[in-house]
């Protein structure tokens, strides 16, 4: 390919973007080289397993957790209630993409993103690639909803049985126990269950399945109820892919990430205008990796007297010409912010009207609300307004997935989600881990290195009885964290993983120096690699090398054969060639002789 004209055609901005993308991919390759654990070299391995782990949910957290476990010699079975791998990303719009920079969304060290904000299909592709590479397909039970997780009789220590040995280890049976007993259970059901809609007077009746078992069954809106009923189309924000929004006015209920994304999708599909109805204001932070990392790394899990510094910076960067959009009553660390660069512009340009309000009811052609000013609280609005619209979109999130499959005594009242040990371990039993399924409010990224770190903490507990925490220790930990977060204005963030993990890791090793041997394993994944994988990889490498040698040998023999054939052919051709050359020489000599005798005759006649 001729690179010169291509390089000449790039604008300076494209140059910068291409250079950035080049380094972006380079950095990811470095991460892969340093941290990606080797997958099992064949589907039959591991055979000498370090333990068996059940994983509930085949979203990116489940796939990544399983990939980590199997790479360190543990066998896994993944249970997924739907018929596909990919979790929430398999059920959102094609145009849905990451809010945060994808460098913060490396859910497994082997992930390779092509750009900073990949869309749904690339996220699904990477999830499925890891799933296949780590030999997880034969270990996944699709269309299998987990409805029961029970301890094997006589194992573990129950709250109801104080006489049982503190260190007694649980073993678990999933559903009817057909897959045998497991040493640990990892719950990766996520935080997005079935699509959630709110009840508004005037809403056409919905045949909604809110039972959780229904999973992704669609709600069909039909029929009516007493009074005026909205005649337009009603959708959930996850259903916009197949909606025809060209030239229509779209009313979006909800101002969180899915609300902003619904406006984005509607405008990109040709909607004429959007109205966003906001019960609460959300902070909108820019798509800037440095800024997002700094906000996510905030150390206290709550609003502090210094949080105004972040707020001032965000106002400066994101709200310059739209001060009326800046949340007045909620701090940056009092809820999950929205990451977006365009929304404020759409409001400024009039493409989207942002209305702080309480909804009164739907009318035949729109919605009636009590509008509020920036400083008024929900319920204090007095100005009645009506907005007309063709489509109503519920951007009201998803139901929290159920975990009623566990025995009740595993999650006592004050130690239920999100009040878990290290935010993820059940305080009654360290062998139950709930990665990315326990938090409520979050600033951070659920798809980053912590999935691996949590998994390796669990593997360390399984490998080394000396490091297992008792229920008493774990509850004490939760109490201390709760004390630190006490009295947080607006409620503390439940997801401030990295700071809590850092404190834990420090204490884990300070208290017992002999645990230092685990530090590189827990942090980087180095040091625990099954011997049989190593042997198999060496055997495979040897086999490959001997195959290559054999092939080279065959090629050499073939080359020799060709050489001999060529020689034989040449030898056969030599006499023929000689004969031909002799004949030609003789012919030419005869002709010359003839010419000479003619000439001689001519000269003889002339001299007569
Ligand atoms: C449009 C969009 C943008 C987002 N952007 C970001 C972002 O930028 N950064 C970020 O950090 N997060 C983002 N998120 C949040 C997103 O939810 C997480 O990043 C991530 O996808 C969660 O993955 P998960 O595997 O933990 O859960 P999920 O993807 O929800 O997967 C859970 C799986 O568990 C299965 N399951 C549930 N219950 C059972 C059961 N009883 N038995 C068997 N299977 C069960 C479900 O069917 C599902 O497949 C975004 C979400 C959406 C929708």
Image (spheres, grey):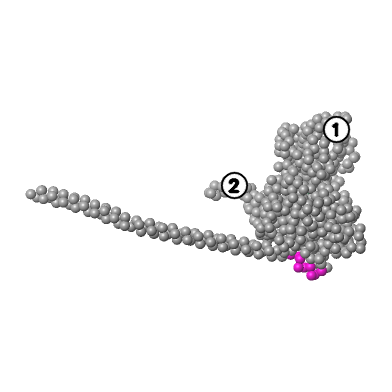
Q: Position of residue 370 (x, y in %)?
A: 87, 36
106 or 190: which is nearer to us?
A: 190
Of residues 608 and 375, the one drawn nearer to the viewer in this rendering:
608
Q: Residue at x 66, y 58 (%)?
A: 42
Q: Are marks 2 and 1 in contact (CB under 8 Å)?
A: no
Q: Which residue is mark 2?
A: 10
**Would you say residue 286 sits in the magenta stretch?**
no
* Left-right relation of 24 to 414: left
Which residue is depicted at the point 74% across and 43% down?
92
Label 2 or label 1, whichever lies nearer to me, is 1
Furthest-bottom residue in this view:
514
Question: Mark 1 — residue?
Answer: 202
Could you tell whether 181 is left or right of 227 in the image? left
Tell me residue 508's x, y (percent).
81, 65
Question: Can residue 565 be seen from the camera position used here?
Answer: yes
**Which residue is at a point 56% across and 60% down the rendered structure image?**
547
Residue 363 visible from this viewpoint: no
The magenta region covers: 512-520
* Label 1 Cα crowd, 10 Å radius (few <14 / some 14-19 / many 20+): many
* Mark 2: secondary structure: loop
Pointer 1 residue Cβ closer than 8 Å to ligand 1: no
Instruction: Please tell me which residue is depicted at 40% across the width and 57% down the height of the picture.
Output: 566
Callout 1: helix, strand or loop? loop
* Number of marks in the rendered image: 2
Marks 2 and 1, Cα distance to the nearest angstrom? 55 Å
Disc 2 crowd rating (10 Å Cα; few below 14, some 14-19, many 20+) is few
N-term-proximal mark, 2 vs 1: 2
């Amino acid at each position: 390919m001729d690179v010169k004209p291509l390089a000449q055609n790039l604008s300076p901005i494209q140059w910068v973007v291409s250079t950035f993308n080049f380094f972006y991919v380079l950095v990811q390759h470095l991460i892969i080289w340093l941290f990606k654990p080797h997958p099992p070299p064949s589907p039959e391995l591991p055979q000498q397993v370090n333990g068996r782990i059940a994983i509930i949910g085949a979203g990116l957290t489940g796939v990544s957790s399983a990939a980590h476990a199997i790479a360190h010699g543990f066998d896994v079975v993944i249970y997924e209630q739907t018929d596909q791998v990919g979790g929430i990303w398999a059920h959102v719009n094609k145009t849905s993409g990451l809010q945060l920079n994808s460098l913060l969304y490396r859910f497994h060290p082997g992930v390779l993103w092509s750009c900073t904000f990949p869309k749904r299909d690339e996220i699904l592709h990477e999830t499925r690639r890891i799933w296949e590479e780590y030999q997880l397909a034969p270990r996944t039970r699709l269309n299998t909803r987990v409805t029961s997780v029970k301890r094997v009789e006589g194992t573990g220590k129950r709250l109801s049985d104080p006489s049982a040995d503190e260190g007694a280890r649980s073993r678990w049976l999933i559903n009817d126990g057909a897959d045998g007993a497991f040493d640990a259970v990892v719950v990766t059901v996520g935080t997005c269950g079935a699509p959630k809609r709110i009840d508004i007077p005037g809403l056409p009746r919905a045949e909604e399945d809110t039972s959780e078992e229904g999973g992704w069954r669609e709600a069909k809106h039909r029929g009516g109820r007493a009074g005026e009923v909205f005649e337009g189309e009603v959708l959930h924000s996850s259903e916009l892919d197949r909606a025809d929004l060209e030239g229509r006015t779209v009313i979006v209920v909800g101002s969180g990430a899915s609300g902003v994304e619904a406006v984005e999708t509607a405008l990109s599909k040709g909607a004429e205008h959007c109205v966003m109805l906001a019960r609460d204001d959300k902070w909108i932070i820019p798509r800037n990796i440095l800024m997002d990392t700094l906000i996510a790394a905030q150390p206290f899990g709550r609003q502090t007297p210094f949080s105004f510094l972040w707020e001032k910076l965000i106002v400066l960067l994101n709200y310059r010409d739209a001060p009326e959009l800046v949340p007045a009553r909620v701090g940056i660390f009092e809820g999950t912010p929205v990451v977006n660069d365009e929304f404020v512009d759409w409001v400024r340009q009039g493409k989207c009207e942002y209305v702080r309000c309480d909804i009164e009811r739907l009318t035949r052609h729109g919605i009636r609300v009590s509008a509020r000013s920036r400083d008024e609280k929900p319920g204090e609005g007095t100005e009645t307004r009506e907005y007309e619209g063709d489509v109503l979109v519920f951007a009201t999130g998803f139901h929290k997935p159920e975990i009623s499959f566990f025995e009740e005594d595993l999650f006592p009242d004050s130690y239920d989600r999100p009040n878990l040990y290290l935010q993820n371990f059940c305080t009654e039993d360290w062998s139950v881990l709930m990665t990315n399924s326990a938090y409520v409010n979050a600033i951070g990224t659920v798809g980053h290195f912590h999935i691996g770190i949590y998994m390796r903490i669990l593997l360390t507990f399984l490998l080394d009885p000396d490091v297992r925490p008792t229920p008493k220790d774990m509850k004490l930990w939760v109490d201390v964290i709760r004390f630190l977060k006490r009295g947080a204005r607006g409620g503390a963030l439940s997801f401030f993983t990295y700071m809590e993990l850092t404190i834990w890791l420090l204490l884990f090793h300070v208290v017992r120096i002999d645990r230092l041997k685990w530090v590189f394993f827990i942090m980087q994944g180095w040091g625990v690699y099954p011997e049989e994988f190593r042997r198999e990889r060496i055997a495979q490498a040897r086999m490959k090398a001997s195959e290559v040698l054999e092939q080279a040998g065959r090629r050499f023999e073939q080359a020799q054969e060709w050489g001999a054939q060529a020689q034989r052919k040449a030898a056969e051709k030599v006499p023929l060639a000689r004969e031909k050359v002799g004949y030609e020489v003789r012919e030419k000599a005869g002709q010359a002789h003839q010419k000479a005798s003619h000439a001689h005759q001519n000269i003889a006649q002339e001299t007569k």
